[in-house]
Amino acid sequence: MLTKKLQDALNEQINKEFFAEYFYLSMSAYLESIEMEGFANYFNVQAQEEHFHAMKMFNFVHDKGGRVILKALKEPKSEFTSVTNVIEESLKHERYVTKSINELMDVAIKENDHSVKSFLEWYVDEQVEEEATISRLLAKLKLINGEGFGVLTLDNQLGMRKYTPGT
Ligand code: FEO
């Protein structure tokens, strides 16, 4: 069983993961609108990963005999100023999610629930990777000043990214 406090905190995180899916889809839609199909594909795949993050937690709450309560999703921002702006926003968002996962882990520690702590380790590690990937992408964009032929080359590369279902 989950304590009420932990169940509420997990439900809040499920909402944040679904919101991340929605936010990345919104970024993908903006990128499509400026003909950056490769970057759009990158965020489409990212959105699928966020869906997986949400469902992994959704299923875990049930495995623990808890109750999932889905809340309304916020409206995601839909307008951005450039490709670089999208990447900056996504890095900012990943840092926010990392903070949120860390706070959730703090609750699990306080409630002394070892199974939740163990489950959350996966998310802690995943956040390191997510932040690193997006930081590298931002660094590359800054190297090419976020414009010109370099952006098209990057767009071509990102167009090849495919979603690999998680476990
Ligand atoms: Fe589910 Fe990108 O954090």
Image (tube, grey):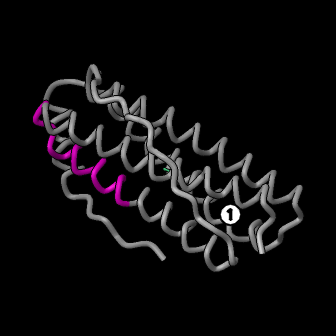
Residue drawn where x is 25% and y is 42% of the image: 28
Query: Which of 152/92 is in front?
Result: 92
Residue drawn where x is 17% and y is 41% of the image: 153
**Picture coordinates of residue 123, whole percent (x, y):** 61, 60
Q: Amino acid at mark 1?
A: Leu
Q: Quadrant of residue 124?
A: bottom right
- The residue that label 1 is drawn on is 120
**Picture coordinates of residue 82, whole percent (x, y):** 26, 23
Please indicate whether residue 19 sits to the left or right of residue 103 in the image.
left
Query: Which of 76/46 is in front?
Result: 76
**Is residue 69 placed above or below 30 in the rendered structure?**
below
Mark 1 neighbour class, 10 Å CA radius: few under 14, some 14 to 19, many 20 or more: some
Q: Mark 1 falls on what kind of element?
A: helix
Q: Quadrant of residue 45?
A: bottom left
**Is residue 62 placed above or below 142 in the rendered structure?**
below
Question: Overall secondary structure of the magenta stretch?
Answer: helix
Q: Is residue 38 magenta?
A: yes
Q: Which residues are magenta?
A: 34-48
Please indicate whether residue 92 sits to the left or right of residue 46 in the image.
right
**Is residue 108 placed above or below 89 in the rendered structure?**
below
**Picture coordinates of residue 79, whole percent (x, y):** 27, 24
Residue drawn where x is 69% and y is 64% of the image: 121
Q: Quadrant of residue 139?
A: top left
Q: Could you tell me which quadrant the N terminus lies in?
A: bottom right
**Is residue 105 placed above or below 62 in the rendered structure?**
above
Query: Which of 98/113 is in front?
Result: 113
Q: Is residue 155 magenta?
A: no
